[in-house]
Image: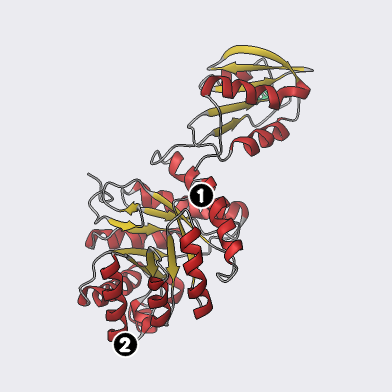
Amino acid sequence: MTRREETKKVMVGTVSIGGDATITVQSMSKRPTTDIAGVLNEIESVLLAGGDIMRVSVPDMDSAKALREIVKSSPLPIVADIHFDFRLALASLDAGVHKLRINPGNIGKAEYVGLIAREAKARGIPIRVGVNAGSLPKDLLKKFGGPTPEAMVEAARREIEILEEADFTDIVVSLKASSPKLAYEANILFAEEFSYPIHVGITEAGFGYQGIIASSVGSAMIFSAGIGNTFRVSLTEDPATEVRVAREILRFLGLRDYWVRIISCPMCARAETKIDDIARKIWDQTKNIRKPISIAVMGCVVNGPGEASHADIGVACGKGYSLIFSRGKPIKKVPNDRIVEELMEQIEKFFGKLESNP
Ligand code: SF4
Protein backbone atom coordinates (compact mmCIF):
# COMPACT_ATOMS: atom_id res chain seq x y z
CA MET A 1 0.00 0.00 0.00
CA THR A 2 1.38 3.45 -0.91
CA ARG A 3 1.35 6.36 1.50
CA ARG A 4 -1.26 7.85 -0.82
CA GLU A 5 -3.67 5.03 0.06
CA GLU A 6 -2.91 5.25 3.77
CA THR A 7 -4.37 8.74 4.01
CA LYS A 8 -7.73 9.57 5.50
CA LYS A 9 -10.63 9.71 3.04
CA VAL A 10 -12.83 12.83 2.97
CA MET A 11 -15.88 13.56 0.83
CA VAL A 12 -16.29 16.65 -1.32
CA GLY A 13 -19.92 16.33 -2.35
CA THR A 14 -20.01 12.95 -4.08
CA VAL A 15 -16.28 13.01 -4.88
CA SER A 16 -13.84 11.36 -2.49
CA ILE A 17 -10.29 12.50 -1.78
CA GLY A 18 -7.76 10.30 -0.01
CA GLY A 19 -7.48 6.64 0.89
CA ASP A 20 -8.11 4.33 -2.06
CA ALA A 21 -9.90 7.05 -4.06
CA THR A 22 -8.83 7.84 -7.62
CA ILE A 23 -6.59 10.92 -7.81
CA THR A 24 -8.98 13.76 -8.56
CA VAL A 25 -8.36 16.77 -10.78
CA GLN A 26 -9.35 20.27 -9.77
CA SER A 27 -9.34 23.69 -11.31
CA MET A 28 -10.19 27.18 -10.16
CA SER A 29 -12.42 29.81 -11.64
CA LYS A 30 -10.74 32.87 -13.11
CA ARG A 31 -13.97 34.88 -13.25
CA PRO A 32 -15.34 37.17 -10.56
CA THR A 33 -17.55 34.89 -8.47
CA THR A 34 -20.39 37.39 -8.84
CA ASP A 35 -20.38 36.63 -12.60
CA ILE A 36 -22.51 33.55 -12.03
CA ALA A 37 -23.04 32.72 -15.72
CA GLY A 38 -19.31 33.14 -16.45
CA VAL A 39 -18.33 30.84 -13.58
CA LEU A 40 -20.88 28.21 -14.62
CA ASN A 41 -19.51 28.30 -18.19
CA GLU A 42 -16.04 27.63 -16.85
CA ILE A 43 -17.37 24.78 -14.70
CA GLU A 44 -18.99 23.24 -17.79
CA SER A 45 -15.67 23.44 -19.67
CA VAL A 46 -13.84 21.89 -16.72
CA LEU A 47 -16.36 19.07 -16.55
CA LEU A 48 -15.94 18.36 -20.28
CA ALA A 49 -12.16 18.43 -19.96
CA GLY A 50 -12.34 15.84 -17.19
CA GLY A 51 -12.19 17.90 -14.00
CA ASP A 52 -13.75 16.57 -10.82
CA ILE A 53 -13.88 19.60 -8.50
CA MET A 54 -14.04 23.38 -9.00
CA ARG A 55 -12.79 26.07 -6.64
CA VAL A 56 -13.95 29.67 -6.54
CA SER A 57 -12.61 32.64 -4.59
CA VAL A 58 -14.86 34.33 -2.08
CA PRO A 59 -13.31 37.77 -1.52
CA ASP A 60 -16.52 39.47 -0.28
CA MET A 61 -20.09 38.92 0.81
CA ASP A 62 -21.50 39.45 -2.72
CA SER A 63 -19.35 36.54 -3.87
CA ALA A 64 -20.58 34.40 -0.97
CA LYS A 65 -24.16 35.21 -1.97
CA ALA A 66 -23.46 34.29 -5.62
CA LEU A 67 -22.23 30.90 -4.44
CA ARG A 68 -25.76 29.76 -3.65
CA GLU A 69 -26.77 29.90 -7.32
CA ILE A 70 -23.43 28.48 -8.47
CA VAL A 71 -23.67 25.51 -6.11
CA LYS A 72 -27.27 24.87 -7.15
CA SER A 73 -26.48 24.83 -10.88
CA SER A 74 -22.97 23.32 -10.85
CA PRO A 75 -22.52 19.72 -11.97
CA LEU A 76 -19.23 19.64 -10.01
CA PRO A 77 -18.65 20.04 -6.28
CA ILE A 78 -17.62 23.56 -5.30
CA VAL A 79 -14.77 24.61 -3.01
CA ALA A 80 -14.92 28.09 -1.47
CA ASP A 81 -11.54 29.80 -1.10
CA ILE A 82 -11.59 32.12 1.91
CA HIS A 83 -9.01 34.42 3.41
CA PHE A 84 -9.21 36.34 6.70
CA ASP A 85 -12.95 36.76 7.21
CA PHE A 86 -14.70 33.95 9.09
CA ARG A 87 -18.10 35.38 8.11
CA LEU A 88 -17.35 34.59 4.46
CA ALA A 89 -16.62 31.00 5.42
CA LEU A 90 -19.91 30.72 7.33
CA ALA A 91 -21.84 32.34 4.45
CA SER A 92 -20.19 29.92 2.00
CA LEU A 93 -21.23 26.97 4.16
CA ASP A 94 -24.76 28.37 4.23
CA ALA A 95 -24.64 28.62 0.43
CA GLY A 96 -24.03 24.85 0.33
CA VAL A 97 -20.38 24.61 -0.76
CA HIS A 98 -18.81 21.16 -0.59
CA LYS A 99 -15.40 22.12 0.80
CA LEU A 100 -13.64 25.13 2.27
CA ARG A 101 -10.11 26.26 1.69
CA ILE A 102 -9.03 28.40 4.61
CA ASN A 103 -5.89 29.01 6.57
CA PRO A 104 -7.04 29.01 10.19
CA GLY A 105 -4.02 31.15 11.07
CA ASN A 106 -5.28 34.10 9.06
CA ILE A 107 -8.88 33.78 10.27
CA GLY A 108 -7.84 35.32 13.58
CA LYS A 109 -9.41 34.41 16.91
CA ALA A 110 -9.60 30.73 17.85
CA GLU A 111 -13.32 31.11 18.56
CA TYR A 112 -13.88 32.09 14.88
CA VAL A 113 -11.98 29.04 13.65
CA GLY A 114 -13.94 26.94 16.14
CA LEU A 115 -17.17 28.30 14.74
CA ILE A 116 -16.18 27.46 11.15
CA ALA A 117 -14.99 24.00 12.22
CA ARG A 118 -18.26 23.26 14.06
CA GLU A 119 -20.41 24.43 11.16
CA ALA A 120 -18.31 22.51 8.62
CA LYS A 121 -18.40 19.37 10.75
CA ALA A 122 -22.17 19.56 11.20
CA ARG A 123 -22.51 19.59 7.41
CA GLY A 124 -19.82 16.98 6.69
CA ILE A 125 -17.73 19.55 4.81
CA PRO A 126 -13.93 19.10 4.68
CA ILE A 127 -11.42 21.93 4.96
CA ARG A 128 -8.21 22.32 3.01
CA VAL A 129 -5.34 24.01 4.72
CA GLY A 130 -3.29 25.66 2.00
CA VAL A 131 0.34 26.42 2.81
CA ASN A 132 2.13 28.56 0.25
CA ALA A 133 5.90 29.12 0.34
CA GLY A 134 5.30 32.73 -0.74
CA SER A 135 3.14 33.65 2.24
CA LEU A 136 4.64 31.88 5.25
CA PRO A 137 4.32 33.49 8.68
CA LYS A 138 7.18 35.91 9.35
CA ASP A 139 8.32 34.15 12.52
CA LEU A 140 8.73 30.88 10.61
CA LEU A 141 10.72 32.57 7.86
CA LYS A 142 12.99 33.95 10.58
CA LYS A 143 13.26 30.69 12.48
CA PHE A 144 14.08 28.58 9.40
CA GLY A 145 16.00 31.26 7.50
CA GLY A 146 13.54 31.45 4.58
CA PRO A 147 10.81 29.40 2.92
CA THR A 148 12.32 25.95 3.55
CA PRO A 149 10.47 22.60 3.46
CA GLU A 150 10.68 22.54 7.28
CA ALA A 151 9.10 26.01 7.52
CA MET A 152 6.27 24.92 5.21
CA VAL A 153 5.54 21.78 7.23
CA GLU A 154 5.67 23.78 10.45
CA ALA A 155 3.13 26.21 8.97
CA ALA A 156 0.89 23.28 8.03
CA ARG A 157 1.27 21.80 11.52
CA ARG A 158 0.11 25.06 13.11
CA GLU A 159 -2.98 25.22 10.95
CA ILE A 160 -3.78 21.55 11.51
CA GLU A 161 -3.42 21.92 15.28
CA ILE A 162 -5.92 24.78 15.33
CA LEU A 163 -8.46 22.61 13.51
CA GLU A 164 -7.72 19.54 15.60
CA GLU A 165 -8.18 21.59 18.77
CA ALA A 166 -11.62 22.41 17.45
CA ASP A 167 -12.10 18.63 17.08
CA PHE A 168 -12.01 18.85 13.29
CA THR A 169 -10.11 16.24 11.27
CA ASP A 170 -11.69 16.16 7.79
CA ILE A 171 -8.60 17.95 6.58
CA VAL A 172 -6.80 18.10 3.23
CA VAL A 173 -3.43 19.84 3.09
CA SER A 174 -1.49 21.50 0.30
CA LEU A 175 2.11 22.66 0.46
CA LYS A 176 2.69 24.68 -2.68
CA ALA A 177 5.68 26.56 -4.01
CA SER A 178 6.59 27.91 -7.41
CA SER A 179 9.82 25.93 -7.13
CA PRO A 180 9.08 22.27 -8.03
CA LYS A 181 11.97 21.07 -5.87
CA LEU A 182 10.82 22.97 -2.80
CA ALA A 183 7.23 21.78 -3.24
CA TYR A 184 8.48 18.19 -3.59
CA GLU A 185 10.65 18.33 -0.47
CA ALA A 186 7.89 19.94 1.61
CA ASN A 187 5.33 17.35 0.52
CA ILE A 188 7.69 14.46 1.27
CA LEU A 189 8.44 15.84 4.72
CA PHE A 190 4.76 16.38 5.43
CA ALA A 191 3.75 12.86 4.35
CA GLU A 192 6.34 11.35 6.70
CA GLU A 193 4.50 12.85 9.65
CA PHE A 194 0.83 13.22 8.69
CA SER A 195 -1.78 10.99 7.10
CA TYR A 196 -4.11 13.71 5.89
CA PRO A 197 -4.73 13.61 2.14
CA ILE A 198 -2.53 15.88 0.04
CA HIS A 199 -3.63 18.37 -2.59
CA VAL A 200 -0.71 18.59 -5.05
CA GLY A 201 0.19 21.71 -6.97
CA ILE A 202 3.03 23.89 -8.12
CA THR A 203 1.81 27.40 -7.56
CA GLU A 204 2.25 30.33 -9.95
CA ALA A 205 3.70 27.88 -12.43
CA GLY A 206 3.39 30.41 -15.27
CA PHE A 207 1.95 30.00 -18.75
CA GLY A 208 2.68 28.07 -21.93
CA TYR A 209 5.34 25.41 -21.94
CA GLN A 210 7.23 26.83 -18.94
CA GLY A 211 4.16 26.52 -16.74
CA ILE A 212 3.36 23.06 -18.04
CA ILE A 213 6.93 21.87 -17.49
CA ALA A 214 7.17 23.32 -13.97
CA SER A 215 3.88 21.62 -13.07
CA SER A 216 4.90 18.36 -14.69
CA VAL A 217 8.33 18.17 -13.05
CA GLY A 218 7.11 19.06 -9.55
CA SER A 219 3.97 16.97 -9.53
CA ALA A 220 5.68 13.98 -11.15
CA MET A 221 8.27 13.95 -8.37
CA ILE A 222 5.55 14.14 -5.71
CA PHE A 223 3.21 11.55 -7.24
CA SER A 224 6.08 9.20 -8.04
CA ALA A 225 6.97 9.19 -4.35
CA GLY A 226 3.59 7.49 -3.75
CA ILE A 227 1.85 10.52 -2.29
CA GLY A 228 -0.73 13.02 -3.53
CA ASN A 229 -4.49 12.55 -3.61
CA THR A 230 -5.93 15.46 -5.55
CA PHE A 231 -4.29 17.67 -8.14
CA ARG A 232 -4.54 21.19 -9.44
CA VAL A 233 -2.27 22.49 -12.16
CA SER A 234 -2.06 26.28 -11.69
CA LEU A 235 -1.48 27.98 -15.02
CA THR A 236 -2.02 31.43 -16.43
CA GLU A 237 -4.39 29.74 -18.84
CA ASP A 238 -8.09 28.88 -18.85
CA PRO A 239 -9.37 26.30 -16.31
CA ALA A 240 -10.05 23.60 -18.95
CA THR A 241 -6.39 23.82 -20.05
CA GLU A 242 -5.30 23.30 -16.44
CA VAL A 243 -7.44 20.17 -16.30
CA ARG A 244 -6.13 18.79 -19.60
CA VAL A 245 -2.55 19.30 -18.46
CA ALA A 246 -3.30 17.59 -15.13
CA ARG A 247 -4.93 14.60 -16.77
CA GLU A 248 -2.00 14.18 -19.19
CA ILE A 249 0.49 14.29 -16.30
CA LEU A 250 -1.53 11.63 -14.44
CA ARG A 251 -1.75 9.54 -17.62
CA PHE A 252 1.98 9.53 -18.23
CA LEU A 253 2.60 8.64 -14.59
CA GLY A 254 0.29 5.66 -15.06
CA LEU A 255 -2.06 6.95 -12.35
CA ARG A 256 -5.22 7.74 -14.30
CA ASP A 257 -5.90 7.16 -17.97
CA TYR A 258 -9.28 7.64 -19.57
CA TRP A 259 -8.71 9.95 -22.51
CA VAL A 260 -7.94 9.93 -26.18
CA ARG A 261 -4.25 10.34 -26.86
CA ILE A 262 -2.86 11.77 -30.08
CA ILE A 263 0.51 10.36 -31.11
CA SER A 264 2.15 12.26 -33.93
CA CYS A 265 5.55 11.93 -35.52
CA PRO A 266 8.06 14.79 -35.28
CA MET A 267 8.20 14.98 -39.13
CA CYS A 268 11.33 14.79 -41.23
CA ALA A 269 12.32 15.16 -44.88
CA ARG A 270 10.15 12.12 -45.71
CA ALA A 271 6.95 13.88 -44.57
CA GLU A 272 4.57 14.26 -47.51
CA THR A 273 2.17 16.74 -45.95
CA LYS A 274 1.81 19.20 -43.07
CA ILE A 275 0.69 16.80 -40.40
CA ASP A 276 0.65 19.37 -37.60
CA ASP A 277 -2.59 20.83 -39.05
CA ILE A 278 -4.13 17.39 -39.28
CA ALA A 279 -3.04 16.42 -35.76
CA ARG A 280 -4.52 19.66 -34.36
CA LYS A 281 -7.84 19.11 -36.17
CA ILE A 282 -8.08 15.54 -34.83
CA TRP A 283 -7.20 16.80 -31.33
CA ASP A 284 -9.90 19.49 -31.51
CA GLN A 285 -12.49 16.85 -32.33
CA THR A 286 -11.39 14.32 -29.74
CA LYS A 287 -9.97 16.25 -26.77
CA ASN A 288 -13.08 15.83 -24.63
CA ILE A 289 -13.62 12.16 -25.39
CA ARG A 290 -13.34 9.89 -22.36
CA LYS A 291 -12.01 6.79 -24.09
CA PRO A 292 -8.42 5.60 -23.73
CA ILE A 293 -7.81 5.36 -27.49
CA SER A 294 -4.45 6.20 -29.05
CA ILE A 295 -4.65 7.91 -32.45
CA ALA A 296 -1.51 8.30 -34.56
CA VAL A 297 -0.91 10.99 -37.14
CA MET A 298 2.25 10.12 -39.10
CA GLY A 299 4.09 11.98 -41.83
CA CYS A 300 4.74 9.23 -44.41
CA VAL A 301 3.27 5.93 -45.57
CA VAL A 302 6.66 4.19 -45.72
CA ASN A 303 7.52 4.40 -42.03
CA GLY A 304 4.37 5.78 -40.41
CA PRO A 305 2.29 2.61 -39.85
CA GLY A 306 5.32 0.69 -38.56
CA GLU A 307 6.56 3.45 -36.26
CA ALA A 308 3.08 3.82 -34.79
CA SER A 309 2.13 0.13 -34.84
CA HIS A 310 1.18 0.37 -31.15
CA ALA A 311 -1.55 2.96 -31.92
CA ASP A 312 -5.16 1.80 -31.85
CA ILE A 313 -5.78 3.67 -35.07
CA GLY A 314 -3.88 6.19 -37.16
CA VAL A 315 -3.21 7.83 -40.45
CA ALA A 316 0.02 7.91 -42.44
CA CYS A 317 0.04 10.76 -44.93
CA GLY A 318 1.34 10.23 -48.46
CA LYS A 319 1.53 12.23 -51.66
CA GLY A 320 -2.10 12.92 -52.68
CA TYR A 321 -3.48 10.04 -50.61
CA SER A 322 -3.08 8.72 -47.11
CA LEU A 323 -3.38 5.38 -45.39
CA ILE A 324 -5.58 4.77 -42.39
CA PHE A 325 -4.21 1.91 -40.29
CA SER A 326 -4.91 0.11 -37.05
CA ARG A 327 -2.17 -1.55 -34.97
CA GLY A 328 0.16 -1.14 -37.95
CA LYS A 329 -2.21 -2.83 -40.46
CA PRO A 330 -3.69 -0.78 -43.35
CA ILE A 331 -7.48 -0.36 -43.40
CA LYS A 332 -8.27 2.24 -46.04
CA LYS A 333 -6.65 4.53 -48.60
CA VAL A 334 -8.15 8.06 -48.50
CA PRO A 335 -7.59 11.28 -50.48
CA ASN A 336 -5.61 13.87 -48.52
CA ASP A 337 -8.42 16.44 -48.54
CA ARG A 338 -10.60 13.98 -46.58
CA ILE A 339 -8.10 12.70 -44.01
CA VAL A 340 -9.80 14.16 -40.92
CA GLU A 341 -13.37 13.11 -41.86
CA GLU A 342 -12.31 9.60 -42.91
CA LEU A 343 -10.19 9.05 -39.82
CA MET A 344 -12.99 10.22 -37.53
CA GLU A 345 -15.40 7.88 -39.35
CA GLN A 346 -13.07 4.92 -38.88
CA ILE A 347 -12.51 5.79 -35.22
CA GLU A 348 -16.27 5.72 -34.60
CA LYS A 349 -16.56 2.46 -36.55
CA PHE A 350 -13.94 0.83 -34.33
CA PHE A 351 -14.72 2.38 -30.97
CA GLY A 352 -18.36 3.43 -31.16
CA LYS A 353 -19.88 6.86 -31.20
CA LEU A 354 -17.55 9.45 -29.72
CA GLU A 355 -19.33 11.90 -27.52
CA SER A 356 -17.91 14.67 -25.38
CA ASN A 357 -19.15 13.10 -22.21
CA PRO A 358 -18.79 14.11 -18.60
FE1 SF4 B 1 9.76 11.00 -40.86
FE2 SF4 B 1 7.85 9.35 -41.75
FE3 SF4 B 1 8.94 8.95 -39.30
FE4 SF4 B 1 7.34 11.02 -39.70
S1 SF4 B 1 6.76 8.84 -39.86
S2 SF4 B 1 9.32 11.08 -38.68
S3 SF4 B 1 7.79 11.59 -41.79
S4 SF4 B 1 9.97 8.79 -41.30
Q: Amino acid under label 1?
A: Leu
Identify the residue at horizontal 37%, vertical 82% (top origin).
107
Residue 253 is situated, as x and y percent measured from the top left of the image, at: 41, 41
- Disc 1 to disc 2, C-alpha distance: 37 Å
Q: Is residue 162 above or below residue 13?
A: below
Res 37 quadrant in image = bottom right
Residue topped by disc 2: 109
Residue 89 is situated, as x and y percent measured from the top left of the image, at: 39, 76
Point out the quarter of the image occupied by ligand 1.
top right
In the image shown, does 80 or 320 lie closer to the viewer? 80
**Res. 184 in view:** no
Q: Is residue 188 left or right of residue 243?
A: left
* N-terminal-most mark, 1 or 2: 1
Identify the residue at horizontal 35%, vertical 86% (top origin).
108
Kindly report which numbered mark, 1 or 2, lies closer to the viewer in this rendering: 1
Residue 201 is situated, as x and y percent measured from the top left of the image, at: 44, 58
Q: Which type of secondary structure does the marked residue at label 2 adopt?
A: loop
Residue topped by disc 1: 47
Residue 306 is situated, as x and y percent measured from the top left of the image, at: 57, 17
Q: Residues within 10 Å of mark 1 (few under 14, many from 20)?
A: many
